[in-house]
Amino acid sequence: MADSPRMQKLARLFLIKALFPLAIAVSRLMKADRDRVSARLIELNNRIVMRIVKAKPPERVLILLPHCLQNENCELKITSDIYKCERCGRCDIEKLASAGERYSLSINIATGGSSALRLVKDTKPQIIAAVACERDLISGISDIYPIPVIGICNRRPDGPCRNTRVSADDIENVLRQMGGI
């Protein structure tokens, strides 16, 4: 892939506006695992975005998390401010909040696509590191274009939208690669 910023932006435009929808449609027709196809598209997007970011590290990074990372039995529902977490250790929110405090990060929980779009509009980030399932990441990356998004797929040990998991180390590694911490 060419390293000129213009070529990287064109590659990303093609990926998001042409290849994403085409690959998803083909995976449906072929009855392929849509999550697996989406994960590969997200990896390709991340490679392109990292090349763009390495040319000029961002100053305003927004980290978006899904509400399903919180343990469903938690009595305190975290719907926006991750730092209100009581740090009981039953979910990954505790470690993410600690990492956020350690590095003074802007970490927000989105309760859905509309809330994520509102957060992006309000914070005007230069880049977003987003955690979600493959389907939501593909949709969000497309909806937020042209803002660069690094997608981090969550794990779903209890099925979709329940007690999902993500490693704080994964997020810290992405931010390190971007020069954000």
Image (cartoon, rainbow, N blue to C red):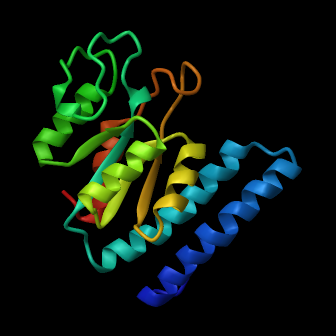
Quadrant in the rendering for residue 150: bottom left
Q: Which of the pair 123/173 is nearer the observer?
A: 123
- Please provide percent x and percent y for residue 77: 30, 20
Residue 174 in view (yes/no):
no
Please state if 37 lies on the left or on the right of 81 as rendered. Answer: right
**Vertical arrangement, residue 26 with respect to residue 2, above or below:** above
- Please provide percent x and percent y for residue 78: 28, 25
Q: Quadrant of the C terminus?
A: bottom left
Tell me which residue sits at (46%, 61%) in the image: 144
Q: How many marks?
A: 0
**Vertical arrangement, residue 126 with respect to residue 128, above or below:** below
Quadrant in the rendering for residue 176: bottom left
Q: Which of the pair 105/40 is nearer the observer?
A: 105
Residue 111 in view (yes/no):
yes
Q: Quadrant of the N terminus?
A: bottom right
**Vertical arrangement, residue 91 with respect to residue 34, above or below:** above
